[in-house]
Amino acid sequence: MIWESRYDIIDLGESANRIQASLRIPFEIDLAGIVSVNGLTSTGSSFQSRWETVKDFRIKDEPRRFNLNLRQLFLEKNINDLRIQFGAIPSVKGSVSSTGLGSNGWIDGFRVDQKTGIGTFEIAAGSINEINNPNYFDRDFVANYFEFEYSSAQILNTNFELSYEKFHFTDYLRSEIRHDMINDGDQHLELALEGLYNTQKNSLSFGITVTTSPLAFVDKELKKYWEVKAYYNHTDENIGLRGILTDDFYRLGNSLTIEMKGAITKKKGLAWFAEAYISEVPRLIAGLRIDVE
């Protein structure tokens, strides 16, 4: 179980001045080693966001609802390097990128991925529908999504991904390359370039990301206390719906974001995070996270 709370101010309070909270309850049930039942119950009222507003300082005495929905519920079977998922599956299979689908979303359908000596091949298909209705039991199924993706094995500290997606009759091409310029155990300085291209609208969303753990260069034991990610993103106005179905999507156009997070306690449990969005409409976020096993 993961509980988070944050203070979020947008445009110096003109657009938002609020306290928000998030609760996520992932689960996995093994059925005699044959198959596992997995799921995610979470707050949030949309595909992209897990956050609920607890207090809006601009509005007095407004009633608030704390929605908790079963977003994902699926069967998973692993056969050596082959994995099969069926049901309301996660929208991503691994790490989250700025142009990838949001990690709290869903695909009502299936995913098959196969690891090989040269990388992982994946096919996913199904329905991404009613993005403002995260309740698994209420969503209507519309066969509108297909993805084929290749993720490379690591070559000279470098990984890359190539994918084709079809969503609502629109074709998208996505690519991503990540290179660790140090790759010395806990010390890392990773550079990532990625892009999402709408072939019909000739529109693009692209990002440049740098991630590191500064304290690891002082003492590797301190790595988890301060992690930094800085990324620039540009998203065209005509990118289409797929281009905004990313984690906690903010806005179209240009933005520079600096994210920081770190542990507070030595053992996993309590952590902090902060985000600054530098754009035409600035945004600041600061919060706490509690993990309960």
Image: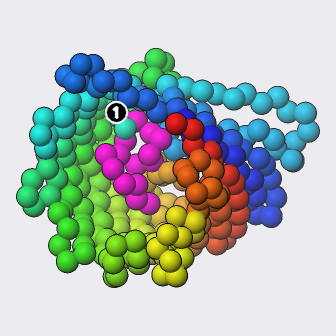
Residue 177 image-quadrant placement: bottom left
Residue ID at (35%, 66%) = 195
Residue 97 image-quadrant placement: bottom left
Q: Position of residue 108 (x, y in %)?
A: 34, 29
Q: Position of residue 62 (x, y in %)?
A: 85, 33
Vertical placement of residue 2 versus 257, above or below: above
Disc 1 marks which amino acid?
Ile
Secondary structure character of the magenta stretch overall: loop
Number of residues whose C-alpha sits closer than 10 Å to that of mark 1, classed few (under 14), some (14–19) or many (20 or more): many
Vertical placement of residue 176 versus 181, above or below: above
**13 falls in the magenta region:** no
Residue ID at (37%, 54%) = 95
Residue, disc 1? 89
Q: Quadrant of the N terminus?
A: top right
Q: Position of residue 186 (x, y in %)?
A: 40, 71
Q: How is the image coloured?
A: rainbow
Q: Is residue 227 visible?
A: no
Question: Between residues 114 and 237, which one lies in front from this camera angle?
Answer: 114
Q: Is residue 147 left or right of residue 46?
A: left
Say which element carries label 1: strand
Residue ID at (46%, 17%) = 137
Residue ID at (54%, 76%) = 215
Q: Which residues are magenta?
A: 91-106
Q: Position of residue 76 (x, y in %)?
A: 26, 29
Q: Is residue 40 left or right of residue 20?
A: left
Question: Between residues 110 and 270, which one lies in front from this camera angle?
Answer: 270
